[in-house]
């Protein structure tokens, strides 16, 4: 099930996204030094791409990694179509 958020939260997300011709959703808000977008939700800083995955695809637990597919050229890309889930070794 997807994470349900208020429309104003989703709007705040979109305000920080640039849609590129490549299909990538480039994050223009705050980022870590590795280029991962940061998004504050319920007082907690989250990775923007994880948040995107949660509101557009499905809720994920903390032991799941969300990584970019190999064709995606944009660090920090938040397009769920460019992302995939990978479980960490710990949970296997
Ligand atoms: Zn992308």
Image (tube, helix red, strand yellow):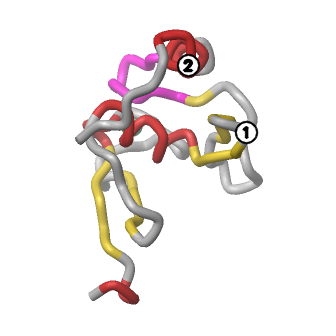
The reply to whether discs 2 and 1 touch (Cβ–Cβ < 8 Å) is no
Q: Look at 52% across and 15% down and name the residue there.
A: 14
Q: Which residue is the site of mark 2?
A: 9
- Viewer-side residue, 84 vs 90: 90
Q: Quadrant of the C terminus?
A: bottom left
Identify the residue at image location x=63%, y=35%.
Answer: 41
Q: Which residues are magenta?
A: 17-26
Q: Nearer the viewer, residue 47 or 61?
A: 61
Q: Which residue is mark 1?
A: 43
Q: Quadrant of the N terminus?
A: top left
31 in magenta: no
Vertically, is 87 above or below 13?
below
Q: Residues within 10 Å of mark 1 (few under 14, many from 20)?
A: few
3 lies left or right of 45: left
Inspect the magenta stretch and tell me whether residue 19 lies in it.
yes
Q: Quick check: 62 above or below 39?
A: below
- The image shows residue 39 at horizontal and vertical percentages of 65, 36
Quarter assignment of residue 65: bottom left
Question: What label does residue 82 carry, if any?
Answer: none
Locate residue 24 relative to residue 58 in the image: left or right: right
Find residue 31 and report its image quarter.
top right
Q: Is mark 1 within 8 Å of ligand 1?
A: no
Expressed as whole percent of the image width and height from the top left, the position of residue 56 reads: 31, 31
Q: Is mark 2 within 8 Å of ligand 1?
A: no
Horizontally, residue 15 falls left or right of residue 44, namely left
User: What crowding class fits label 2: few (fewer than 14 Cα within 10 Å), some (14-19), or many (20 or more)?
Assistant: some
Which mark is first along the chain, 1 or 2?
Answer: 2
| 35 relative to 9, above or below | below
How many angstroms separate mark 2 from mark 1 (CA)? 12 Å
Q: Secondary structure at mark 2?
A: helix
Label 1, secondary structure: give it: loop
């Amino acid at each position: 099930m997807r994470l349900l958020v208020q429309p104003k939260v989703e709007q705040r997300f979109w305000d920080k996204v640039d849609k590129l011709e490549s299909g990538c959703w480039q994050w223009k808000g705050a980022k870590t030094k590795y280029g991962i977008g940061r998004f504050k939700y319920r007082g907690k800083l989250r990775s923007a791409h994880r948040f995107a995955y949660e509101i557009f695809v499905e809720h994920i637990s903390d032991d799941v990694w969300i990584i970019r597919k190999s064709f995606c050229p944009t660090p920090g890309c938040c397009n769920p179509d460019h992302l995939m889930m990978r479980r960490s070794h710990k949970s296997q």
